Image (cartoon, helix red, strand yellow):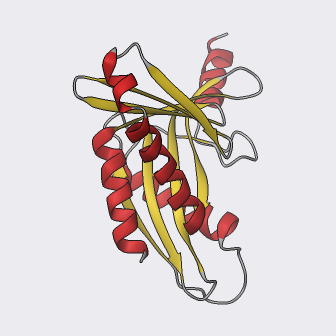
Amino acid sequence: MSLIFILTITTSFSQVKTNNNNVFVAKEFSKDIALYNSKNFLFKNVLGSNSDVVQFEIIPLAAASSGELTTMLYKCDSKQKEGLVLGFYGNYWNDAGVLYQGYAFKNFEKDQAIEFLNKIQSAIDDNKKFINDEADNNNIYFKYDEIDVLIWSSSQTYTIRLFWNGFDSSWEKTAFDRSKRRFEKKIK
């Protein structure tokens, strides 16, 4: 009986791919882990794996203090591709209903990344009076390319929650502003 229990626990919490959506089990969330794992995602899913030697760079921009979201900029001159990768971290339920701490990546090419970041900033700027009127109670939301975005204010700041692919990640004002500023500075 104890052998079955040990095998069940080992299988449930081992570090293996859980499905084909690049969601893996993760023990901890950090900018270093996001950078390490995003490289595989980037060259296989965005740039395309091939036999030629291809140079690219990926730079971590900011990690949310919650540990649930990391932003990374990438550039590949030979493929003429650059953009933003969002690294989502948090609880993930697989098809069998098993709870994992997992991660997945969402790519935005340059123009789409600029549009996404600007839409969030514009939504906050255009609705500042409303969301500040009743902090924590007044909210705004919208959908952008499979990501549901929820925004509210509290204590003279705002919080952005991104819902995507089973993840619910908080992105506080400081991390959002840092990501946007660094992205705009480095992408020119």
Residue shown at 68% from the left, 42% from the top = 146
Dividing the picture into quadrants, the one containing residue 16 is top right
Residue 43 percent location from the top left of the image: 62, 70
Q: Is residue 115 visible?
A: yes
Residue 67 percent location from the top left of the image: 38, 38
Q: Is 89 in front, or is 151?
A: 151
Q: Is residue 158 left or right of residue 166?
A: left
Dividing the picture into quadrants, the one containing residue 54 is bottom right
Indicate the quadrant containing the C terminus: top left, top right, bottom left or bottom right. bottom left
Q: Is residue 98 left or right of residue 103?
A: right
Residue shown at 34% from the left, 14% from the top = 134
Q: Single out the residue that lies furthest toward the left.
A: 156
Q: Is residue 97 left or right of residue 147?
A: right
Q: How many marks?
A: 0
Residue shown at 60% from the left, 60% from the top = 112
Residue shown at 60% from the left, 21% from the top = 6
- 27 is higher (above) or lower (below) than 49: above
Q: Is 90 in front, or is 16?
A: 90
- 50 is higher (above) or lower (below) than 110: below
